[in-house]
Amino acid sequence: MIKRSGHTLRVATVFIILLLPAAVFGQYDYIDINNPFSRKIPMAIPAFAALNSDGTDPTLLKKATDVLTNSLDFTGFFNMIDRGAYLLEPGNPVITIDQINFRNWTTIGAELLVTGGLSQTGSLVDIELRLFDTLTGKRLLGKRYHGTVDDVRPIILRFCNEVILQLTGKRGIFDSKIAFVSNGSGNKEILICDFDGSNPVPFTRHGTISLSPAWSSDGKWIAYTTYVNKKPDIFIHRTEGSEKATVEEKGINITPSWVPGQFTLSATMSFAGNQEIYLLTGSGKIIKKITNNWASDLSPSWAPDAKMMAFVSNRTGAPQIYVQDIKTGQVERLTFEGNYNTQPNWSPTGDRIAYTSMAGSRNDIFTIDLKRRQPLQLTQDTGNNESPSWSPDGSLIAFSSTREGPARIYVMTAFGADQRRLLTMPGEQSSPSWSPNLSKY
Amino acid sequence: MRKKLWIFLALFLVIPVLLGTVSCAKKTVTKEEPAPVMAPAPAPPPPPVEDKAAKAFDMAKSEFLRENIYFAFDKSILDDMAQATLKNKAEFLKTYPDVYTTIEGHCDERGTPEYNLALGERRAESAKSFLVDMGIEAYRISTVSYGEERPVCTEQTEDCWAKNRRDNFIIN
Protein backbone atom coordinates (compact mmCIF):
# COMPACT_ATOMS: atom_id res chain seq x y z
CA MET A 1 0.00 0.00 0.00
CA ILE A 2 2.72 2.39 1.03
CA LYS A 3 4.77 1.24 -1.89
CA ARG A 4 1.93 1.80 -4.33
CA SER A 5 1.20 5.35 -3.27
CA GLY A 6 4.91 6.10 -3.48
CA HIS A 7 4.87 4.77 -7.02
CA THR A 8 1.84 6.79 -8.08
CA LEU A 9 3.38 9.94 -6.67
CA ARG A 10 6.43 9.35 -8.82
CA VAL A 11 4.21 8.92 -11.85
CA ALA A 12 2.55 12.22 -11.09
CA THR A 13 5.95 13.86 -10.66
CA VAL A 14 7.10 12.84 -14.09
CA PHE A 15 4.17 14.42 -15.82
CA ILE A 16 3.84 17.61 -13.84
CA ILE A 17 3.75 20.70 -16.00
CA LEU A 18 4.00 24.18 -14.58
CA LEU A 19 1.36 26.29 -16.31
CA LEU A 20 2.97 29.61 -15.46
CA PRO A 21 5.21 30.80 -12.70
CA ALA A 22 3.11 31.95 -9.79
CA ALA A 23 1.98 35.52 -10.33
CA VAL A 24 3.50 36.58 -7.05
CA PHE A 25 6.20 34.33 -5.67
CA GLY A 26 6.37 33.49 -1.99
CA GLN A 27 3.26 35.14 -0.62
CA TYR A 28 3.87 33.77 2.83
CA ASP A 29 1.94 36.39 4.73
CA TYR A 30 -1.52 34.88 4.21
CA ILE A 31 -1.24 32.48 7.13
CA ASP A 32 1.04 32.55 10.16
CA ILE A 33 0.85 29.06 11.62
CA ASN A 34 2.50 30.20 14.85
CA ASN A 35 -0.19 32.76 15.59
CA PRO A 36 -2.89 31.30 17.85
CA PHE A 37 -5.27 34.11 16.95
CA SER A 38 -4.89 34.02 13.18
CA ARG A 39 -8.31 34.01 11.63
CA LYS A 40 -9.43 31.40 9.13
CA ILE A 41 -9.33 32.66 5.56
CA PRO A 42 -12.70 32.30 3.78
CA MET A 43 -12.16 29.98 0.82
CA ALA A 44 -14.41 28.88 -2.04
CA ILE A 45 -13.89 25.68 -4.04
CA PRO A 46 -16.44 25.16 -6.85
CA ALA A 47 -17.05 21.57 -7.97
CA PHE A 48 -14.50 20.23 -10.47
CA ALA A 49 -15.44 20.93 -14.08
CA ALA A 50 -15.13 18.37 -16.87
CA LEU A 51 -12.58 19.65 -19.40
CA ASN A 52 -13.75 17.39 -22.21
CA SER A 53 -17.34 17.06 -23.38
CA ASP A 54 -17.55 13.31 -22.82
CA GLY A 55 -15.54 10.46 -21.30
CA THR A 56 -15.19 12.02 -17.88
CA ASP A 57 -16.83 10.01 -15.12
CA PRO A 58 -18.96 12.35 -12.95
CA THR A 59 -18.10 10.25 -9.86
CA LEU A 60 -14.42 10.97 -10.54
CA LEU A 61 -15.22 14.71 -10.64
CA LYS A 62 -17.02 14.40 -7.33
CA LYS A 63 -14.14 12.43 -5.81
CA ALA A 64 -11.66 15.07 -6.99
CA THR A 65 -13.80 17.87 -5.54
CA ASP A 66 -14.14 16.05 -2.21
CA VAL A 67 -10.42 15.27 -1.89
CA LEU A 68 -9.51 18.90 -2.67
CA THR A 69 -12.08 20.42 -0.31
CA ASN A 70 -11.61 17.98 2.57
CA SER A 71 -7.82 18.13 2.40
CA LEU A 72 -7.59 21.94 2.46
CA ASP A 73 -10.31 22.06 5.13
CA PHE A 74 -8.29 19.55 7.21
CA THR A 75 -5.52 22.10 7.79
CA GLY A 76 -7.79 24.35 9.85
CA PHE A 77 -6.43 27.40 7.97
CA PHE A 78 -9.58 28.02 5.96
CA ASN A 79 -13.24 28.67 6.41
CA MET A 80 -14.93 26.76 3.59
CA ILE A 81 -17.85 28.75 2.20
CA ASP A 82 -20.94 26.64 1.61
CA ARG A 83 -21.40 25.82 -2.09
CA GLY A 84 -25.06 26.79 -1.89
CA ALA A 85 -23.98 30.43 -1.51
CA TYR A 86 -21.87 30.50 -4.70
CA LEU A 87 -23.01 32.90 -7.43
CA LEU A 88 -22.47 30.66 -10.44
CA GLU A 89 -24.12 30.71 -13.83
CA PRO A 90 -25.16 27.15 -14.61
CA GLY A 91 -23.27 25.51 -17.46
CA ASN A 92 -20.41 28.00 -17.50
CA PRO A 93 -17.20 26.50 -16.21
CA VAL A 94 -15.23 28.75 -13.90
CA ILE A 95 -11.65 27.61 -14.03
CA THR A 96 -9.32 30.12 -15.66
CA ILE A 97 -8.72 33.74 -14.74
CA ASP A 98 -10.65 35.12 -17.74
CA GLN A 99 -13.70 33.00 -16.82
CA ILE A 100 -13.82 34.32 -13.28
CA ASN A 101 -15.86 37.28 -12.13
CA PHE A 102 -13.99 37.97 -8.89
CA ARG A 103 -16.78 40.19 -7.60
CA ASN A 104 -19.05 37.10 -7.48
CA TRP A 105 -16.60 35.66 -5.00
CA THR A 106 -15.79 38.72 -2.91
CA THR A 107 -19.55 39.34 -2.55
CA ILE A 108 -19.98 36.04 -0.71
CA GLY A 109 -16.90 36.74 1.40
CA ALA A 110 -14.43 34.41 -0.31
CA GLU A 111 -10.86 35.70 -0.20
CA LEU A 112 -9.27 32.65 -1.78
CA LEU A 113 -10.67 30.65 -4.67
CA VAL A 114 -9.45 27.24 -5.80
CA THR A 115 -10.66 25.90 -9.14
CA GLY A 116 -10.23 22.44 -10.59
CA GLY A 117 -10.82 20.91 -14.01
CA LEU A 118 -10.44 17.30 -15.08
CA SER A 119 -10.55 15.45 -18.35
CA GLN A 120 -10.62 11.70 -18.46
CA THR A 121 -9.61 9.53 -21.43
CA GLY A 122 -10.08 5.90 -20.49
CA SER A 123 -7.85 5.31 -17.47
CA LEU A 124 -5.83 8.49 -18.02
CA VAL A 125 -6.62 11.90 -16.55
CA ASP A 126 -5.47 15.48 -17.01
CA ILE A 127 -6.05 17.76 -14.05
CA GLU A 128 -5.75 21.54 -13.88
CA LEU A 129 -5.73 23.29 -10.53
CA ARG A 130 -5.50 27.00 -9.73
CA LEU A 131 -5.42 29.19 -6.64
CA PHE A 132 -6.68 32.79 -6.84
CA ASP A 133 -6.63 35.76 -4.52
CA THR A 134 -10.13 37.18 -5.11
CA LEU A 135 -9.35 40.52 -3.46
CA THR A 136 -6.46 41.32 -5.82
CA GLY A 137 -7.87 39.26 -8.70
CA LYS A 138 -4.55 37.52 -9.14
CA ARG A 139 -3.64 33.91 -9.71
CA LEU A 140 -1.26 32.68 -7.01
CA LEU A 141 -0.77 29.19 -8.37
CA GLY A 142 -1.57 27.23 -11.53
CA LYS A 143 -0.66 23.60 -12.20
CA ARG A 144 -1.51 20.91 -14.71
CA TYR A 145 -1.01 17.24 -13.93
CA HIS A 146 -1.25 14.06 -15.94
CA GLY A 147 -1.68 10.57 -14.53
CA THR A 148 -4.00 7.61 -14.23
CA VAL A 149 -7.40 7.49 -12.57
CA ASP A 150 -5.70 6.05 -9.47
CA ASP A 151 -3.44 9.12 -9.29
CA VAL A 152 -6.28 11.60 -8.75
CA ARG A 153 -5.90 11.66 -4.98
CA PRO A 154 -2.07 11.89 -4.92
CA ILE A 155 -2.17 14.59 -7.62
CA ILE A 156 -4.65 16.71 -5.69
CA LEU A 157 -2.75 16.21 -2.42
CA ARG A 158 0.38 17.36 -4.19
CA PHE A 159 -1.37 20.51 -5.35
CA CYS A 160 -2.62 21.08 -1.79
CA ASN A 161 0.99 20.97 -0.60
CA GLU A 162 1.77 23.71 -3.15
CA VAL A 163 -1.16 25.79 -1.89
CA ILE A 164 0.04 25.59 1.69
CA LEU A 165 3.63 26.35 0.70
CA GLN A 166 2.35 29.40 -1.19
CA LEU A 167 0.29 30.67 1.72
CA THR A 168 2.43 29.76 4.76
CA GLY A 169 5.96 29.42 3.41
CA LYS A 170 6.03 25.82 4.68
CA ARG A 171 5.28 22.53 3.01
CA GLY A 172 1.86 21.12 3.75
CA ILE A 173 1.15 17.87 5.52
CA PHE A 174 -0.61 16.12 2.65
CA ASP A 175 2.25 13.71 1.97
CA SER A 176 2.50 12.68 5.63
CA LYS A 177 1.12 9.60 7.34
CA ILE A 178 0.16 8.66 10.87
CA ALA A 179 1.23 5.43 12.56
CA PHE A 180 -0.91 4.31 15.47
CA VAL A 181 -1.79 1.34 17.66
CA SER A 182 -5.08 -0.52 17.24
CA ASN A 183 -6.40 -3.62 19.02
CA GLY A 184 -9.11 -4.24 16.42
CA SER A 185 -7.57 -7.58 15.46
CA GLY A 186 -7.67 -8.75 19.09
CA ASN A 187 -4.02 -7.78 19.64
CA LYS A 188 -2.33 -4.41 19.74
CA GLU A 189 -0.79 -3.96 16.31
CA ILE A 190 0.68 -0.93 14.55
CA LEU A 191 -1.17 0.48 11.55
CA ILE A 192 -0.41 3.36 9.20
CA CYS A 193 -2.97 5.71 7.63
CA ASP A 194 -2.78 8.87 5.51
CA PHE A 195 -2.64 12.28 7.23
CA ASP A 196 -6.45 12.48 7.16
CA GLY A 197 -7.14 8.96 8.47
CA SER A 198 -7.81 7.42 5.07
CA ASN A 199 -6.29 4.16 3.82
CA PRO A 200 -5.36 2.54 7.15
CA VAL A 201 -3.13 -0.50 6.54
CA PRO A 202 -1.50 -2.92 9.00
CA PHE A 203 2.21 -2.37 9.59
CA THR A 204 2.79 -5.16 12.15
CA ARG A 205 1.20 -8.61 12.30
CA HIS A 206 2.90 -9.97 15.40
CA GLY A 207 -0.21 -11.22 17.22
CA THR A 208 1.04 -9.83 20.54
CA ILE A 209 1.33 -6.39 22.19
CA SER A 210 3.02 -3.79 19.96
CA LEU A 211 3.30 -0.16 21.11
CA SER A 212 4.90 3.28 20.67
CA PRO A 213 5.60 3.62 16.92
CA ALA A 214 8.24 6.26 16.08
CA TRP A 215 9.23 7.50 12.59
CA SER A 216 12.81 8.20 11.62
CA SER A 217 13.22 11.78 10.39
CA ASP A 218 13.62 10.61 6.78
CA GLY A 219 10.38 8.63 7.12
CA LYS A 220 12.05 5.39 6.03
CA TRP A 221 12.04 3.56 9.35
CA ILE A 222 9.65 2.95 12.19
CA ALA A 223 10.90 1.83 15.59
CA TYR A 224 8.40 0.40 18.06
CA THR A 225 8.08 -1.61 21.25
CA THR A 226 6.80 -5.17 20.96
CA TYR A 227 6.31 -8.29 23.10
CA VAL A 228 7.30 -10.70 20.32
CA ASN A 229 9.93 -12.09 22.74
CA LYS A 230 7.40 -12.08 25.63
CA LYS A 231 8.99 -8.92 27.05
CA PRO A 232 9.20 -5.33 25.80
CA ASP A 233 11.89 -5.09 23.09
CA ILE A 234 12.40 -2.56 20.32
CA PHE A 235 12.02 -3.56 16.68
CA ILE A 236 13.26 -1.23 13.94
CA HIS A 237 11.59 -1.84 10.57
CA ARG A 238 11.91 -0.20 7.19
CA THR A 239 8.51 1.21 6.17
CA GLU A 240 8.98 -0.13 2.65
CA GLY A 241 10.84 -3.40 2.37
CA SER A 242 11.80 -6.01 4.91
CA GLU A 243 15.04 -4.72 6.47
CA LYS A 244 14.92 -4.78 10.24
CA ALA A 245 16.96 -4.59 13.42
CA THR A 246 16.14 -5.33 17.04
CA VAL A 247 17.09 -4.11 20.50
CA GLU A 248 16.63 -7.08 22.81
CA GLU A 249 18.71 -6.35 25.88
CA LYS A 250 17.73 -7.81 29.26
CA GLY A 251 14.95 -5.89 31.01
CA ILE A 252 12.81 -3.31 29.24
CA ASN A 253 13.63 -1.74 25.88
CA ILE A 254 10.98 0.96 25.42
CA THR A 255 10.06 4.46 24.15
CA PRO A 256 12.12 4.61 20.94
CA SER A 257 12.56 8.10 19.48
CA TRP A 258 14.74 9.10 16.51
CA VAL A 259 17.26 11.92 16.56
CA PRO A 260 16.28 14.47 13.87
CA GLY A 261 18.41 14.33 10.73
CA GLN A 262 20.33 11.25 11.86
CA PHE A 263 20.07 7.48 11.57
CA THR A 264 20.26 7.45 15.36
CA LEU A 265 17.74 6.32 17.90
CA SER A 266 17.23 7.04 21.57
CA ALA A 267 15.38 4.67 23.89
CA THR A 268 14.97 3.66 27.51
CA MET A 269 16.72 0.45 28.54
CA SER A 270 17.19 -1.24 31.91
CA PHE A 271 19.82 -3.92 31.20
CA ALA A 272 22.29 -2.18 33.53
CA GLY A 273 19.79 -2.24 36.38
CA ASN A 274 18.44 1.29 36.15
CA GLN A 275 16.03 2.71 33.58
CA GLU A 276 18.12 5.18 31.56
CA ILE A 277 17.95 6.74 28.11
CA TYR A 278 20.59 5.50 25.67
CA LEU A 279 21.68 6.61 22.24
CA LEU A 280 21.72 3.80 19.67
CA THR A 281 22.59 3.49 16.02
CA GLY A 282 19.65 3.05 13.66
CA SER A 283 20.56 -0.62 13.56
CA GLY A 284 20.21 -0.95 17.33
CA LYS A 285 23.83 -0.83 18.60
CA ILE A 286 24.37 1.12 21.81
CA ILE A 287 26.42 4.29 21.34
CA LYS A 288 26.26 5.74 24.85
CA LYS A 289 24.11 6.44 27.87
CA ILE A 290 22.50 9.90 27.83
CA THR A 291 20.81 10.16 31.24
CA ASN A 292 22.36 9.26 34.57
CA ASN A 293 20.01 9.27 37.53
CA TRP A 294 18.73 6.74 40.04
CA ALA A 295 15.13 7.40 38.92
CA SER A 296 13.28 6.24 35.80
CA ASP A 297 14.24 8.26 32.72
CA LEU A 298 12.13 7.61 29.64
CA SER A 299 10.17 8.95 26.63
CA PRO A 300 12.89 10.99 24.88
CA SER A 301 11.78 13.58 22.30
CA TRP A 302 14.26 15.72 20.39
CA ALA A 303 14.40 19.39 19.46
CA PRO A 304 14.50 19.77 15.66
CA ASP A 305 18.16 20.86 15.84
CA ALA A 306 18.99 17.72 17.90
CA LYS A 307 20.81 19.85 20.48
CA MET A 308 18.27 19.32 23.23
CA MET A 309 16.25 16.31 24.35
CA ALA A 310 13.05 16.38 26.40
CA PHE A 311 12.26 13.34 28.55
CA VAL A 312 10.24 12.10 31.51
CA SER A 313 11.82 11.44 34.88
CA ASN A 314 10.38 10.69 38.30
CA ARG A 315 13.54 11.93 40.05
CA THR A 316 11.45 14.22 42.28
CA GLY A 317 9.10 11.35 43.15
CA ALA A 318 6.50 11.87 40.43
CA PRO A 319 6.86 12.01 36.66
CA GLN A 320 7.78 15.43 35.26
CA ILE A 321 9.22 16.67 31.97
CA TYR A 322 12.88 17.68 31.78
CA VAL A 323 15.10 19.01 29.02
CA GLN A 324 18.74 18.06 28.64
CA ASP A 325 21.43 19.91 26.71
CA ILE A 326 23.12 17.09 24.83
CA LYS A 327 26.54 18.76 24.62
CA THR A 328 26.84 19.90 28.25
CA GLY A 329 24.61 17.24 29.80
CA GLN A 330 22.87 19.95 31.79
CA VAL A 331 19.33 18.98 32.82
CA GLU A 332 16.52 21.39 33.58
CA ARG A 333 13.01 20.66 34.84
CA LEU A 334 10.37 22.06 32.50
CA THR A 335 6.97 21.28 34.07
CA PHE A 336 5.98 22.37 37.58
CA GLU A 337 2.18 22.31 37.44
CA GLY A 338 0.49 18.99 38.18
CA ASN A 339 2.18 15.87 39.55
CA TYR A 340 1.97 13.55 36.56
CA ASN A 341 3.37 15.02 33.34
CA THR A 342 4.50 12.56 30.65
CA GLN A 343 4.70 11.95 26.87
CA PRO A 344 6.70 15.02 25.76
CA ASN A 345 6.63 15.65 22.00
CA TRP A 346 8.85 18.46 20.74
CA SER A 347 7.25 20.63 18.05
CA PRO A 348 8.98 20.57 14.64
CA THR A 349 8.99 24.39 14.89
CA GLY A 350 11.16 23.99 17.98
CA ASP A 351 9.43 26.49 20.26
CA ARG A 352 6.89 24.30 22.06
CA ILE A 353 6.62 20.87 23.66
CA ALA A 354 3.28 19.07 23.78
CA TYR A 355 2.73 16.68 26.69
CA THR A 356 0.09 14.84 28.69
CA SER A 357 -0.85 15.95 32.19
CA MET A 358 -2.96 13.93 34.59
CA ALA A 359 -5.40 15.59 36.98
CA GLY A 360 -7.60 13.31 39.09
CA SER A 361 -7.74 10.21 36.96
CA ARG A 362 -7.98 12.09 33.67
CA ASN A 363 -5.29 12.89 31.15
CA ASP A 364 -5.29 16.09 29.10
CA ILE A 365 -3.01 17.52 26.44
CA PHE A 366 -0.97 20.61 27.16
CA THR A 367 1.79 22.50 25.42
CA ILE A 368 4.53 24.50 27.08
CA ASP A 369 6.52 27.16 25.26
CA LEU A 370 10.23 27.01 25.92
CA LYS A 371 10.70 30.76 26.29
CA ARG A 372 8.03 31.74 28.78
CA ARG A 373 7.53 28.25 30.23
CA GLN A 374 3.79 28.78 30.28
CA PRO A 375 1.60 25.63 30.09
CA LEU A 376 -1.39 25.89 27.75
CA GLN A 377 -4.23 23.38 28.13
CA LEU A 378 -5.58 22.15 24.79
CA THR A 379 -8.15 19.52 25.84
CA GLN A 380 -10.53 19.46 28.78
CA ASP A 381 -13.66 17.70 30.07
CA THR A 382 -13.59 15.20 27.21
CA GLY A 383 -12.49 11.85 28.66
CA ASN A 384 -8.85 10.81 28.52
CA ASN A 385 -6.67 12.67 26.06
CA GLU A 386 -3.16 11.28 25.50
CA SER A 387 -0.16 10.84 23.24
CA PRO A 388 0.19 14.19 21.43
CA SER A 389 2.14 14.04 18.15
CA TRP A 390 2.87 17.12 15.99
CA SER A 391 2.24 17.27 12.26
CA PRO A 392 5.47 17.85 10.28
CA ASP A 393 4.68 21.57 9.81
CA GLY A 394 3.83 22.05 13.50
CA SER A 395 0.31 23.30 12.73
CA LEU A 396 -1.66 20.27 13.99
CA ILE A 397 -1.51 17.76 16.83
CA ALA A 398 -2.76 14.17 16.62
CA PHE A 399 -3.76 12.52 19.91
CA SER A 400 -5.94 9.76 21.30
CA SER A 401 -9.14 10.42 23.22
CA THR A 402 -11.93 8.47 24.93
CA ARG A 403 -14.41 11.38 24.53
CA GLU A 404 -16.79 9.19 22.52
CA GLY A 405 -16.28 6.02 24.59
CA PRO A 406 -13.60 3.78 23.09
CA ALA A 407 -10.19 5.36 22.50
CA ARG A 408 -9.86 6.86 19.01
CA ILE A 409 -7.37 9.03 17.15
CA TYR A 410 -8.21 12.76 16.96
CA VAL A 411 -6.61 15.84 15.44
CA MET A 412 -6.64 19.48 16.57
CA THR A 413 -4.77 22.64 15.67
CA ALA A 414 -1.59 23.56 17.53
CA PHE A 415 -3.74 25.77 19.78
CA GLY A 416 -6.50 23.25 20.45
CA ALA A 417 -9.07 24.36 17.86
CA ASP A 418 -11.07 22.14 15.47
CA GLN A 419 -10.86 18.91 17.48
CA ARG A 420 -12.15 16.06 15.33
CA ARG A 421 -11.93 12.29 15.01
CA LEU A 422 -9.51 11.05 12.39
CA LEU A 423 -10.93 7.60 11.73
CA THR A 424 -13.38 4.98 12.95
CA MET A 425 -12.42 1.34 12.96
CA PRO A 426 -12.97 -1.76 15.10
CA GLY A 427 -11.35 -1.89 18.54
CA GLU A 428 -9.54 0.98 20.23
CA GLN A 429 -6.81 3.17 18.75
CA SER A 430 -3.99 4.94 20.56
CA SER A 431 -0.43 6.30 20.37
CA PRO A 432 -0.59 8.24 17.09
CA SER A 433 2.81 9.14 15.64
CA TRP A 434 2.84 11.67 12.82
CA SER A 435 5.43 11.05 10.11
CA PRO A 436 7.68 13.70 8.58
CA ASN A 437 6.96 14.82 5.00
CA LEU A 438 7.35 11.65 2.97
CA SER A 439 7.88 12.98 -0.55
CA LYS A 440 10.93 14.81 -1.80
CA TYR A 441 9.24 17.59 -3.75
CA MET B 1 37.34 -96.71 55.24
CA ARG B 2 34.07 -97.54 53.64
CA LYS B 3 32.17 -96.12 56.58
CA LYS B 4 34.15 -92.92 56.25
CA LEU B 5 33.36 -92.83 52.58
CA TRP B 6 29.69 -93.26 53.31
CA ILE B 7 29.86 -90.48 55.83
CA PHE B 8 31.57 -88.28 53.31
CA LEU B 9 29.00 -89.17 50.72
CA ALA B 10 26.28 -88.59 53.20
CA LEU B 11 27.74 -85.24 54.11
CA PHE B 12 28.16 -84.30 50.47
CA LEU B 13 24.67 -85.34 49.56
CA VAL B 14 22.70 -84.64 52.72
CA ILE B 15 24.14 -81.34 53.81
CA PRO B 16 23.46 -79.61 50.52
CA VAL B 17 19.97 -81.09 50.63
CA LEU B 18 19.58 -79.89 54.15
CA LEU B 19 20.99 -76.55 53.20
CA GLY B 20 18.78 -76.61 50.16
CA THR B 21 15.71 -77.31 52.22
CA VAL B 22 16.72 -74.62 54.63
CA SER B 23 17.21 -72.11 51.81
CA CYS B 24 14.01 -73.32 50.25
CA ALA B 25 12.26 -72.89 53.51
CA LYS B 26 13.71 -69.40 53.78
CA LYS B 27 12.65 -68.60 50.25
CA THR B 28 9.13 -69.74 50.88
CA VAL B 29 9.03 -67.75 54.03
CA THR B 30 10.28 -64.61 52.32
CA LYS B 31 7.91 -65.27 49.48
CA GLU B 32 5.04 -65.74 51.80
CA GLU B 33 5.74 -62.73 53.92
CA PRO B 34 6.03 -59.98 51.32
CA ALA B 35 3.51 -61.53 49.00
CA PRO B 36 0.49 -60.72 51.08
CA VAL B 37 1.98 -57.35 51.93
CA MET B 38 2.70 -56.51 48.28
CA ALA B 39 -0.78 -57.18 47.10
CA PRO B 40 -2.89 -54.83 49.22
CA ALA B 41 -0.37 -52.66 51.08
CA PRO B 42 2.46 -51.56 48.73
CA ALA B 43 0.41 -48.72 47.27
CA PRO B 44 -0.62 -47.15 50.59
CA PRO B 45 2.54 -47.07 52.74
CA PRO B 46 5.41 -45.79 50.52
CA PRO B 47 3.49 -43.66 47.98
CA PRO B 48 1.30 -42.06 50.65
CA VAL B 49 4.43 -40.23 51.69
CA GLU B 50 5.02 -38.99 48.10
CA ASP B 51 1.34 -38.21 47.70
CA LYS B 52 1.36 -36.04 50.77
CA ALA B 53 4.43 -34.26 49.51
CA ALA B 54 2.86 -33.77 46.08
CA LYS B 55 -0.33 -32.53 47.64
CA ALA B 56 1.59 -30.14 49.86
CA PHE B 57 3.51 -28.89 46.82
CA ASP B 58 0.32 -28.45 44.81
CA MET B 59 -1.26 -26.48 47.61
CA ALA B 60 1.80 -24.32 48.16
CA LYS B 61 2.15 -23.86 44.42
CA SER B 62 -1.42 -22.76 43.89
CA GLU B 63 -1.12 -20.32 46.77
CA PHE B 64 2.15 -19.04 45.29
CA LEU B 65 0.45 -18.50 41.94
CA ARG B 66 -2.74 -17.08 43.44
CA GLU B 67 -1.35 -14.56 45.94
CA ASN B 68 -0.54 -11.24 44.24
CA ILE B 69 1.10 -8.31 45.90
CA TYR B 70 -0.44 -4.86 45.46
CA PHE B 71 0.89 -1.30 45.20
CA ALA B 72 -0.26 2.27 45.74
CA PHE B 73 -0.72 4.51 42.70
CA ASP B 74 2.59 5.37 40.99
CA LYS B 75 4.50 3.46 43.70
CA SER B 76 6.75 0.43 43.67
CA ILE B 77 7.33 0.38 47.45
CA LEU B 78 6.38 -2.86 49.25
CA ASP B 79 3.92 -2.25 52.09
CA ASP B 80 3.57 -4.57 55.14
CA MET B 81 1.03 -6.78 53.42
CA ALA B 82 3.16 -7.14 50.33
CA GLN B 83 6.17 -8.00 52.48
CA ALA B 84 4.21 -10.64 54.42
CA THR B 85 3.08 -12.21 51.15
CA LEU B 86 6.62 -12.13 49.80
CA LYS B 87 7.91 -13.89 52.94
CA ASN B 88 5.52 -16.77 52.15
CA LYS B 89 6.83 -16.78 48.59
CA ALA B 90 10.39 -16.93 49.89
CA GLU B 91 9.49 -19.92 52.12
CA PHE B 92 7.98 -21.68 49.14
CA LEU B 93 11.04 -21.01 47.00
CA LYS B 94 13.34 -22.23 49.80
CA THR B 95 11.29 -25.40 50.26
CA TYR B 96 11.29 -26.13 46.55
CA PRO B 97 14.72 -25.20 45.24
CA ASP B 98 13.89 -26.51 41.74
CA VAL B 99 11.22 -23.86 41.25
CA TYR B 100 12.06 -20.90 38.99
CA THR B 101 9.65 -17.98 38.94
CA THR B 102 8.78 -14.97 36.79
CA ILE B 103 7.37 -11.88 38.48
CA GLU B 104 5.01 -9.87 36.27
CA GLY B 105 4.66 -6.17 37.17
CA HIS B 106 1.38 -4.45 36.29
CA CYS B 107 -0.19 -0.98 36.58
CA ASP B 108 -3.67 0.48 36.52
CA GLU B 109 -4.85 2.17 33.36
CA ARG B 110 -4.40 5.70 34.65
CA GLY B 111 -1.35 7.64 33.69
CA THR B 112 0.25 6.81 30.36
CA PRO B 113 1.35 3.51 28.82
CA GLU B 114 5.10 4.23 28.47
CA TYR B 115 5.55 5.42 32.04
CA ASN B 116 3.51 2.44 33.20
CA LEU B 117 5.87 0.06 31.37
CA ALA B 118 8.71 1.55 33.40
CA LEU B 119 6.67 1.49 36.62
CA GLY B 120 5.64 -2.15 36.07
CA GLU B 121 9.29 -3.13 35.81
CA ARG B 122 10.14 -1.27 39.03
CA ARG B 123 7.28 -3.11 40.79
CA ALA B 124 8.51 -6.51 39.59
CA GLU B 125 12.11 -5.64 40.46
CA SER B 126 11.28 -4.49 43.98
CA ALA B 127 9.62 -7.85 44.70
CA LYS B 128 12.63 -9.63 43.22
CA SER B 129 15.07 -7.66 45.41
CA PHE B 130 13.03 -8.55 48.48
CA LEU B 131 13.14 -12.26 47.63
CA VAL B 132 16.87 -12.10 46.94
CA ASP B 133 17.38 -10.39 50.32
CA MET B 134 15.46 -13.32 51.83
CA GLY B 135 18.09 -15.65 50.42
CA ILE B 136 16.56 -16.76 47.12
CA GLU B 137 19.08 -17.06 44.31
CA ALA B 138 18.64 -14.19 41.84
CA TYR B 139 18.99 -16.53 38.85
CA ARG B 140 15.78 -18.30 39.88
CA ILE B 141 13.73 -15.10 39.53
CA SER B 142 12.93 -13.33 36.23
CA THR B 143 10.88 -10.18 35.89
CA VAL B 144 8.73 -8.77 33.11
CA SER B 145 6.68 -5.57 32.95
CA TYR B 146 3.29 -5.51 31.29
CA GLY B 147 2.60 -1.88 32.20
CA GLU B 148 -1.14 -1.26 31.84
CA GLU B 149 -1.51 -3.83 29.04
CA ARG B 150 -2.92 -6.77 31.07
CA PRO B 151 -5.57 -5.48 33.50
CA VAL B 152 -7.55 -8.03 35.52
CA CYS B 153 -10.36 -5.53 36.03
CA THR B 154 -11.60 -2.94 33.54
CA GLU B 155 -14.03 -0.76 35.46
CA GLN B 156 -13.18 2.86 36.15
CA THR B 157 -13.22 2.56 39.93
CA GLU B 158 -10.53 2.77 42.61
CA ASP B 159 -11.38 -0.84 43.61
CA CYS B 160 -10.65 -1.99 40.11
CA TRP B 161 -7.51 0.12 39.70
CA ALA B 162 -6.20 -1.25 43.03
CA LYS B 163 -6.61 -4.83 41.73
CA ASN B 164 -4.60 -3.96 38.63
CA ARG B 165 -1.65 -2.39 40.49
CA ARG B 166 -0.02 -5.73 41.19
CA ASP B 167 2.81 -8.20 40.85
CA ASN B 168 1.72 -11.68 39.99
CA PHE B 169 3.93 -14.74 40.10
CA ILE B 170 4.41 -17.45 37.54
CA ILE B 171 6.28 -20.75 37.84
CA ASN B 172 8.52 -21.41 34.87
Image: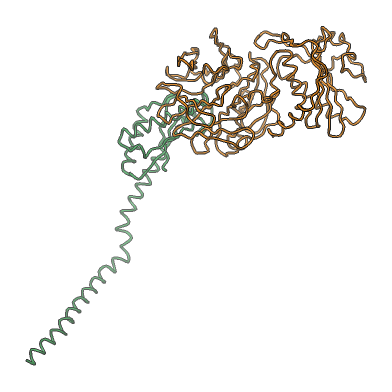
Residue A35, image x, y percentages? 66, 9
Residue B100, image x, y percentages? 38, 42
Q: Does the rendering let one see residue A384?
A: no
State the image quarter where residue B66 is shown: top left
Residue sitting at 58 percent across and 27 percent down?
Answer: A214
Structure colour scheme: by chain
State the image quarter where residue A344 is shown: top right
The single residue placed furthest to the bottom in the displayed view is B2
Residue A134, image x, y percentages? 82, 10
Q: Quadrant of the N terminus of chain B?
A: bottom left
Residue sitting at 87 percent across and 27 percent down?
Answer: A119
Q: Is residue A222 left or right of residue A129?
A: left
Does B42 appear above or below A139?
below
Q: Is residue B124 left or right of residue A392?
A: left
Does B14 appear above or below A256?
below
How many numbered marks appear?
0
Q: Nearer the viewer, residue B27 or A193?
A: A193
Q: Does the rendering let one see residue A204?
A: yes
Q: Quadrant of the C terminus of chain B?
A: top left
Does A73 appear above or below A200?
above
Residue A184, image x, y percentages? 62, 35
Q: Is residue A181 left or right of residue A103?
A: left
The chain in green: B
Residue sitting at 47 percent across and 29 percent down?
Answer: A286
State the image quarter where residue A156 is shown: top right
Q: Nearer the viewer, residue A200 or A362?
A: A200
Colour that chain A carries in the picture = orange
